[in-house]
Amino acid sequence: MQKQAISTKPIRSLEDAIEKCQTLGMRVSRQRHFILELLWQANEHLSAREIYDRLNQQGKDIGHTSVYQNLEALSNQGIIECIERCDGRLYGNISDSHSHVNCLDTNQLLDVHIDLPEDLIRFVEEQTGVKITDYSINFYGYRNLGEGENK
């Protein structure tokens, strides 16, 4: 996946996300700020419904439509991450390249930064004839293996 030269600075904090919005000319409305703040505080991947519920539990008045529209705008601009899963979309706070660990017993999606050895990348390039410019790995496993389970 070729990265655009415009997005050279990774977004690693709430401040970076707000700065990126402003650089792109996006208005940082109260609702947009609430969503960004929640994603950085939660530090996990959440569905739009979970974001809506948590914001309203915190007493922040925001409607369903506003949540969905802001999530779409923020993910389309590469400010937050959007992951398509069979049970819906999940949104996370890290937008630069990273991999994921899918916990099958808790259904959590955890971010992990992995640097593959250069010889492995060269091996993949030789096998495929494709120059690797970026990568993301998906790991799957169980946090809690019960007795006698071979998963």
Image (cartoon, rainbow, N blue to C red):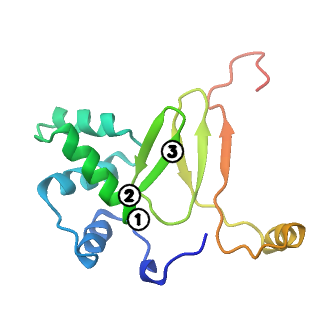
Distance Cα–Cα, label 1 vs label 3: 15 Å
What kind of residue is marked 2? Ser
Relative to 2, say whether 98 is above or below: above
Please indicate whether residue 49 sits to the left or right of residue 142 in the image.
Answer: left
Ranked by sequence position, the earlier of labels 3 and 2 is: 2
Depth check, front residue: 20 or 67: 67
Q: Which residue is mark 2?
A: 75
Residue at image coords 78%, 16%: 148
Q: Percent from the top left, x then y, of residue 134?
A: 64, 70
From this viewpoint, is residue 59 visible?
A: yes
What number of labels is visible? 3
Please indicate whether residue 24 sits to the left or right of residue 76 in the image.
Answer: left
Distance Cα–Cα, label 3 vs label 2: 12 Å
Relative to 59, say whether 6 is above or below: below
Q: Residue furthest top?
A: 148
From this viewpoint, is residue 44 visible?
A: no
Distance Cα–Cα, label 2 vs label 1: 5 Å
Q: Residue furthest bottom?
A: 5
Q: Secondary structure at mark 3?
A: strand
Mark number for residue 42? none
Q: Percent from the top left, x then y, of residue 65?
A: 21, 42
Residue at image coords 43%, 43%: 90
Q: CB atoms at circles 2 and 1 under 8 Å apart?
A: yes
Q: Which residue is mark 3?
A: 84
Ranked by sequence position, the earlier of labels 1 and 3 is: 1
Q: Secondary structure at mark 1?
A: loop
Placement of the C terminus among the 4 image quadrants:
top right
Residue at image coords 49%, 48%: 83
Q: Which residue is mark 1?
A: 78
Q: CB atoms at circles 3 and 2 under 8 Å apart?
A: no
